[in-house]
Amino acid sequence: MLKKRTLTTALLLAAAGPAMAFTHTGKDVDKSMFEGREIAPDPWADQCDVERSLVPIEGKENLYRHTNNTFPATHSGLVLIQDEGALVIDAGNRCAAEWLRDEIRERFDKEITLAILTHAHFDHLAGSSVYQEAGAEIIAQRNALEPIIGEKMPVAEPTITFDEEMTVTFGDYEVLLHHEPAGNHSNSMVQVWIPELSAMQCTDVCQSETFPYMDFLDFYYPGWIETLDWVIDKNPDVIDVGHYSPATAEDQVALRDYMTELHDQVLELHREGMPWDQLWRNVTAGNEHKDDWFGYEYMRVHNIRGMFRWVDNHRRGLW
Ligand SMILES: [Zn+2]
């Protein structure tokens, strides 16, 4: 069912001009689930000395990317500016979110009216309370609610959720939200696709000539490959991966090749009966990207370890 959302405060109406609504196909969250919840202190509240930026994405009208400028960026997300306000994906920490809120006010004379949280990992949600305090509606996949409450996360409380697919009409744009039910990098992940701009948010699952992060924490192998297939099928011009720098569809084809090769090698060696100590030394997947991808030294052995953990957990021999 299509539900109308309208800007609520007089302040917002004054800043944004005539009240324009965005529409969505999600479900409103029963706010009572957050009543009296315990909220842990924000461990990154004082991280304010990082250089920040909001940069236009070349050739994509109204589309920007917020990030901090150092490589590898600790956070990034797409920003869509329309008459009715700004749609922002993820945050980074409180100071970064305050900076972004003020930057959008100064440069565009707009408020953040809608925020999409890609997944319930703190490094992407820290500071998102700033958006909520400014009056934004907050979208997350339904599975994000449990860890936000259970981990006492000092982050925005979602006001709209969905299960597998959701559409938001924001100004002139249709924004499609997709969730892979088998999981990928968490079981609460949202891919955000703006067809008219051929732009995708694919945080942490997609890579930008970079090895996936460490030991595949919060990992679901089959769903990860399903998600990459979904992304590759859309053939986006530009993909924001939540860190680093923007990526292409070709980068995801190369990532898929690496991950399936890594999986198949680890499984084969495991079936040969190799103990971990011997197994990881025999994996060759990823060697071809030693020089052209970031993270070979930091991530690759951890990647093998994470894949070994997945394979070891999911395989049974003849017993
Ligand atoms: Zn993550």
Image (spheres, helix red, strand yellow):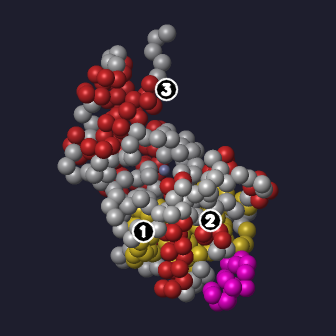
Reply above or below: 18 against 314.
Answer: below
The label shown at residue 129 is: 2
Residue 287 locus on image (x, y percent): 22, 40
Q: Hey, which residue is sitting farthest front in the picture?
A: 46
Q: Which residue is drawn at 44% across and 61% down?
A: 75
Residue 109 locus on image (x, y percent): 55, 87
Reply above or below: 120 against 17.
Answer: above
Q: Earlier in the sequence, mark 1 or mark 3?
A: 1
Q: Which residue is drawn at 60% across and 70% down?
A: 131
Within 8 Å: ligand 1 and the Cβ of disc 2?
Answer: no
Element under disc 1:
loop
Q: Please give the range of residues in magenta.
A: 6-22
Identify which residue, 135 or 86, lies in the foreground.
Answer: 135
The label shown at residue 49 is: 1
Residue tagged by mark 3? 314
Specify the quadrant of the image occupied by residue 112: bottom right
Element under disc 3:
helix
Within 8 Å: ligand 1 and the Cβ of disc 1?
Answer: no
* Residues at marks 1 and 3 touching, judged by CB atoms closer than 8 Å: no
Residue 129 locus on image (x, y percent): 62, 65
Give the amino acid at mark 1: Asp
Q: Earlier in the sequence, mark 2 or mark 3?
A: 2
Real-space Cα distance between discs 2 and 3?
Answer: 38 Å
